[in-house]
Image: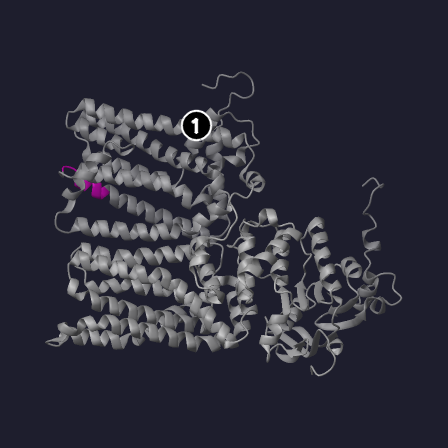
Amino acid sequence: MTEGAGEAVPAVRVRGLWKRFGEQVAVAGIDLELPAGRFIGLVGPNGAGKTTTLSMVTGLLRPDQGTVEVVGHDVWRDPVQVKARIGVLPEGLRLFERLSGRELLAYTGRLRGLHGAEVDKRATQLLDVLDLAGAQHKLVVDYSTGMRKKIGLACALLHNPEVLFLDEPFEGVDPVSAQTIRGVLERYTGSGATVVFSSHVMELVESLCDWVAVMAAGRIRAHGPLAEVRGGAPSLQQAFLELVGAHGRTAGADLDWLGGGAAR
Amino acid sequence: MSSNAGVSAVSITPVVVRLKLSLLRNGLRQSAGRRAAYVTSVVLVLLFAALQLLGLIALRGNAHATAVAVLLVAVLALGWAVMPLFFPSGDETLDPTRLVMLPLRPRPLVRALLAASLVGIGPVFTLCLLIGSVISVAHGAAAYVTAVVAVVVALLVCVALARAVAAANIRLLSSRKGRDLAVLSGLVIAIGAQLVNFGAQRLGSAGGLSKLDPVADVLRWLPPASAIGAVDSVSEGSYGVGIAQLVLAVATLVGLLALWSRHLTRLMTSPDGSTVQAAEPAARERGSSGLGRLLPSGRTGTVMERSLRYVWRDPKTKAAWVTSLAIGLIVPVFNALQGTGSIYFACFAAGMLGIQMYNQFGQDTSAFWIVAMTISSTRDAYVELRGRALALLVITLPYATLVTVLTTAMLGDWPKLPEVLGLSFALLGAMLATGAWSSARFPYSIPQEGYKNVAPGQTGLAWISIFGGMVSAALLAAPVIALTIWGNVTADGDEWTWLLLPLGAGYGALITVLGLRLAAPRTARRLPEILAAVSKG
């Protein structure tokens, strides 16, 4: 599979991916190829299966069926190759919160097998760029949501991965931190790396990504370059609502009493 | 005293007392389980108080009655002082910052809160005990009069003490550090119970109550126990001493009230804890800790450093460790002190600390994903587990050795030292081996909030993990145990028992390595399953 030129190998290739939790089907047979070197958005409403999919792609959750390859290497059969090449920022999982920000970076970097001096150098730079230098000696347990996302991102970037998976990296993040994260990610993809991130904020995906995959109810509804998926719709938001079949649901006549002007 | 004209002539004391009663009632209304728990605890406390009362009355006339009464009251006061630190959420009126928006003056507020504090099971229990104490020591009319004053003063000192401590530490108690502290409360009770148990046993044996007298001689001057001391002094006709002791208690009460009032005023006129904490600059200076430089490089040292930091910084891990350390010391040493102990009890230290190897990944909580992302081979898993075992050994080896030597010294049985040490090391090795394996096979979540150590639905898993593991550990250590028994039973065995030290240590090291080797492939294969199992907290 790696015999072709580097360009041809997709960042992620997913075949027939399934996951059930008891009765509920979280991911219902996904086939997907994500091109390398792009800023890729995985969008969908809450409960669409984004987190489950990303967990399976990154090896944190075992799929019931299907295969996942990252940069040509099977996630489950060749973890040595895959884990060295990816960075992950999961949603809903803790960090080692009783370490300070700097200690967490030092710990993660060294677990990744980087040299101590190199880890410290990179940590200092990441802390500076992400505006965490002032809080680097505070325990992560005392960090705000935005600061946690940023330190998580720093941990994910520390070993300079080829593909970065971010689950809802902007959820609960203030505009200033969001802009900082954005800047770092744009610089990172600019150098040829791949970012895959999930979100349900369409405006954000539209302004950041050049490639999107739309998920709903455990399936991929559309995928491709942003312009292609958007098609004739005025915005990704509109295209998305049509794709997931929510366009008819405009709250209208029922609430005709609601609004200013009228006496009661 | 509050002669300021206008605002309101109505005292706020009844209002606050009623508030306290409403809070109590509404708390009970929330759930039947809570109501049942409350009623049960009330019944138990009252029963206990009644028994105490009867016991104290029975002591009346006994030569050591004063010693017992004074000691009880001193312990009670200590309890009141410590209580708010470990059960900060118990009483909402205890948190004066909730009243901060109301136009209240400190003096009436202190009076009202003090009155409200007298409502509850704790004060009733205290009152029973105090009454019992004075009954056991008071003789004569003058003493009875003193007793009435003494009970009131002692009760107020207890309550004021609790309030003053709470007010002085409210910033701590409403912060993350305070909540961390609360996790340790179960531990304080466990160790306290051990100490009380030991104390009771000592009193029951041999010399009995007379051993208390020297302690009581000091405590009878320490408020609020000095109030009880006063009753005793008056009973014996030393009125001067009695008055001095009573004055001391009253002065303490006044001092505590003043202290409380000052803290209260400051609390209610300055920004609350959260604001202050957020604005605080990072206090600690930078630079890697000395710890890191002492540890081996690579993954081993990294894992060890994180594990050791967690022993100190993570409240759950810390509580587990302190419990193990304390019980591992208390059981052998106290048994030796009582003279009934066997030197083999020293193995308790190794056994208790070995338990910390169990459920290693559960201790990580869902942060285990960070570890999982960096384990891509059996080798990685092996180094990870070995690092954790080594971190444990850094504390356990010296500690188990120390406890063994200490126990031996107390029993004076030096020839037995090598074999007991050998046995300890073999047991520790067996615990590490089974701990590593069951960490991989039976991981379970440890909830980070509250007192529970197992997530709902995983209790069975936890029992299998710990008790199955301990039985297996005992079986694994069986060869060394058998050798020890053989050495002691055989005629010339004693000459060879020293061999058990190198044998036990070697055996322990060997099975630890084997256990890690067995656990590593399982860990590497089951990473997603382990992550799922430990993420339920």
Where the N terminus of chain B falls, by quadrant? Answer: top left
Residue at (34% x, 59% y) in the render: B324
Residue pointed to by mark 1: B111
Toward the viewer: A161 or A147? A161
Q: Which residue is depicted at the point 49% across and 59% down?
A: B447
Residue A91 spot, x, y in % from top left: 62, 62
Number of numbered labels in the structure image = 1
Residue farthest along the front direction in this orientation: A117
Q: Foreground: A126 or B233?
A: A126
B153 or B355: which is nearer to us?
B355
In the rendering, at what x and y percent does residue A14 appear?
69, 77
State yes or no: residue B328 in magenta.
Answer: no
Q: Residue furthest right?
A: A232
Residue drawn at point x = 26 percent, y = 49 percent = B196
Residue B231 position (above or below residue B53): above
Q: Chain of mark 1?
A: B
Give the prevailing secondary structure in the magenta stretch.
Answer: helix
Please report the bounds of the magenta region as a residue range.
B54-61
Q: Is residue B21 left or right of residue B199?
A: right
At x 62% / y 62%, what residue is drawn? A156
- Please state the horizontal and vertical placement of residue A29, each as a whole percent of the image: 70, 78
Label 1 amino acid?
Arg
Question: SS at mark 1?
Answer: helix
Can residue B165 be seen by looking at this rendering? yes
Reply yes or no: does residue B58 show up in magenta.
Answer: yes
Question: In which image quadrant can residue A41 be found?
Answer: bottom right
Determine whether B292 is above or below A27 in the image.
Answer: above
Residue A2, by quadrant, is: bottom right
Quick one: B267 or A102, which is closer to the camera?
A102
